[in-house]
Amino acid sequence: MKYEMYQEIMEQPLSLKNTIESEKEHLESISNIYAKFDKIFLIGCGSSISTCYSIKDAIKSFSTINVDVQTGFEFVNHQMLEKDSNVGLIVTSQSGETADTLAALRKAKEHNITTVSITNDENSSMAKEADYSVITRCGEEHAILGTKTYITQLFSLYVIFFSMIKNQRIEEMLGQLYQLPDLIEELIESTQDDAKQLAQANKDVDIFYCMGSGFNYGLAYKLAMTMFMEGAEKHACPLYSGEFRHGLIERVEKGVSVVFLKSNDVDDITDKAIKFCEGIEVNNIIFNLEDYSDVDSLLTPFILLIPLEWFIYHLSIFNGLDPGSTRHIGKIRY
């Protein structure tokens, strides 16, 4: 049996291609506008906020762009704003109707802050109310994990922010970014079998720690929060690799499972954690960029996403679950 998530994994290359064709020039024009702001707020929740974490950590090594990532609730209830300040706000939401994210958008507009929405529904409230609306061209998405909407949201943020930075490496990386549909299609075909075997080997694990350094932390957050916990119904915790030596280093032991997301040129701290865990026979599960592609390491979240999706998809099935269903999300409102 193939669940809805299966089809949505398969649709990612086309969703990316359609989004590139439809929104590339629009995203670049938004980049020119937002490059003039002193500060940019990024708002989202779940998979959407994980894309915000990824872009924040990806650009800070290359620019002094001031980015503040918050949930909608925190922005609405705990963020002081001044009218006519030189700031911008970008909201990310699959549906364009997420209540706290929408409230954040409306608060920003009350303070005359320029707003952008990145959503998958051109008829949504966010798309209609934001000053600029980016529409990810994914069609409907039903599985809770967020596959094609996640990858197109992340793509949109990469174009907006990295188009602000002018150097040779970034220009080359952006060229690779626009070639992702073909690469993602190849990864979908080539990574499923190994991910399925890995899922079978770990089907009885109850708790996973998910670690990433820099721009890999956003994906570690998504992996723990919306993939393991929502999709596979496993306990999980996301961590910056640099924080391994605080807390988790005292709890890892033989049989404990840690998922490492790794990019060689930026991950000395991740390497140290991996070596420590190997020494005490921790169940290390390593997803390493160099095993899948030789693209710029800044694109690691896009590349590792695909084997991770297959891993969670099959892990759910081995545990008798529909990987796209939920028990409470969408039924209980706050």
Image (cartoon, rainbow, N blue to C red):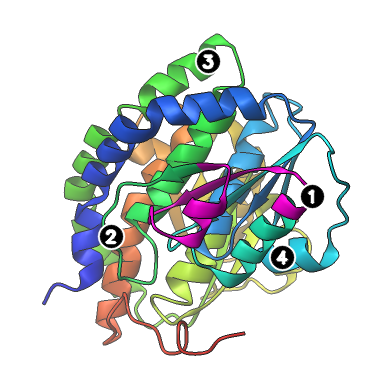
Distance in Å between CA atoms under marks 2 and 3: 31 Å
Badges 4 and 2: C-beta atoms under 8 Å apart?
no
Residue type for callout 3 = Arg
Mark sitting earlier along the chain (4/3)? 3
Furthest residue to the left?
1
- In the picture, the disc for residue 169 is 3
Per the rendered image, the range of residues in magenta is 109-132
Q: Secondary structure at mark 4?
A: helix
Residue at image mark 4? 249
Looking at the picture, which amino acid does disc 4 mark? Answer: Ile
In percent of the image, x 44 and y 60: which residue is there?
124
- Number of the front mark, 1 or 2: 1
- In the displayed structure, would residue 101 be above or below residue 64? below
Classify 10 Å Cα crowding around label 2: few (below 14), some (14-19), many (20 and above).
many
Query: Which amino acid type is marked by label 1?
Result: His
Q: Nearer the viewer, residue 89 or 67?
A: 89
Q: Residues within 10 Å of mark 3 (few under 14, many from 20)?
A: few
Against 159, residue 81 (above or below) is below
Q: Earlier in the sequence, mark 4 or mark 2?
A: 2
